[in-house]
Amino acid sequence: MDLHILVINSGSSSIKFSLFEAADGEPASLFEGEVTGIGTEEAGFKFHDATGKDLSGGRSEVKAKTPTEAIGLVVGAVSGAGLPEVDAVGYRVVHPGAKLDRHQRITSKVIEDLEEAVVFAPLHDPAVIEVIREMMQRFPGVEHYACFDTVFHETMLAAATTYPIPAEFRERGVRRYGFHGLSCESIVRQLQAEERRGGLKFPRRMVIAHLGSGCSVTAVVDGRSIDTTMGLTPTGGIVMGTRPGDLDPGLLLYLMRQMKGDGLAGLEKLLNHASGMVALSGMANDMKAVRAAAAKGDRKARLAVEVFTRSVKKAVGGFIALMGGVDMVVFAGGIGEHDALSRSEIAGGLEALGVSVDAALNEAKDDAVRRISASDSGAAVMVVPAKEDWMIAVHVSCMAGSGEKA
């Protein structure tokens, strides 16, 4: 029996949604869409089928001043004439907090635990909790499942997750959780499928660089996460589009003293929305535009790119040293998959560690899994699409098929 799974990947101002069909094989995407600019005067709406055919009915601009209105657009789209009935709904949830350590069916207890986790992810979890509550009312007759961005990193040892702070805070769940786990897991699964097809040998030691608006680097051994750059929240680690990555704790104290009246809320906004590459370049969060400005001699844009690629290179090199070598380096995410210059600049200088890129292969345009390493590279260098929504559909299909109960 075919299972039709609606996947919701929501942010603070957008909701991406996909409808998958899961039968005997892997889930296949049937329809995809997105509501953007939620809370603004002019929200955007996209909806198309697997072939790219536009199904939005010409409604590129819509009314979505609240998450409830946005959900109404999503429900209306996936409930249209000729579309299959939704059998299950899966959600990407960024932070599960200290009590949830596996993907699971959503119950009232799970929602309670998620509400407790808001203290760790005040910018991410409240929006998704609101979306979950609304969707459960709109689809009361189906099961709903939460898939967490942290679960892939549950294999990290205590030495990788423990912060050197007093025990009273560690006992409250303050530790390094890691994020982009669904992306990393989808990459592992795609590479395993490539090996089964005879396309490559699955690597024992791998570094995954997920580079998009949010960025992280993860060390993987035998398909399991052993360390990653993000920590308690997605704000830490390497430099990102609007987030600074790791900072001197003393700098945070300095900023708090300087900001005076703005206090904690002002600092939180600065760190999550006004730092990273946008702070350095003075431009919008758009790597393509920053690259273009840097090519024209814009010093701020050039510095932003250099700070970004340098931070990624340091993380990749550090994890190679941690693992005692590397068999594969993977680039994923919007920047990782589409910005050839970032890939070459990050790989440049890693030749001594066995990593080098073929210029022609690196410049090739292709959305599939592909190798870009030079013929004399000791490690394979790959570009692999991050397929978070598909990974959620895989998990929901497994949980629904097994009758999993939380």
Image: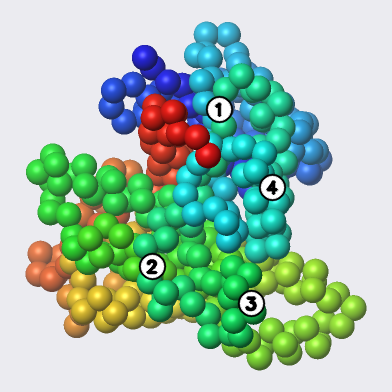
* SS label for mark 1: strand
Q: How many marks?
A: 4
Q: Residue furthest top?
A: 82
Q: Amino acid at mark 2?
A: Met
Residue 140 position (above or below residue 154): above
Residue 125 position (above or below residue 197): below
Residue 106 position (above or below residue 4): below
Location of residue 281 (image quadrant): bottom right
Q: Is 28 on the left-hand or right-hand side of 352?
A: right
Location of residue 300 (image quadrant): bottom right
Whether residues under marks 4 and 1 lie with C-beta atoms below 8 angstroms apart, the answer is no
The picture places residue 61, in percent across and down from the top left corner, at: 71, 31
Which residue matches tag 1?
Answer: 143
Which residue matches tag 4?
Answer: 112
Q: Amino acid at mark 1?
A: Glu
Q: Who's the residue at 32% across and 50% down the image?
A: 187
Foreground label between 4 and 2 = 4
Mark 4 neighbour density, 10 Å: few (under 14) some (14–19) many (20 or more): few
Q: CA distance from mark 1 to mark 2?
A: 30 Å
Can residue 21 be seen in the rendering of this structure? yes
Dot 3 or dot 2: first in sequence order is 2
Which residue matches tag 2?
Answer: 156
Viewer-closest of 100 and 259: 100
Q: Who's the residue at 36% across and 51% down the image?
A: 185
Q: Amino acid at mark 3?
A: Phe
Q: Amino acid at mark 4?
A: Glu
Query: Residue 169's mark?
Result: 3
Dot 1 or dot 2: first in sequence order is 1
Mark 1 neighbour density, 10 Å: few (under 14) some (14–19) many (20 or more): some
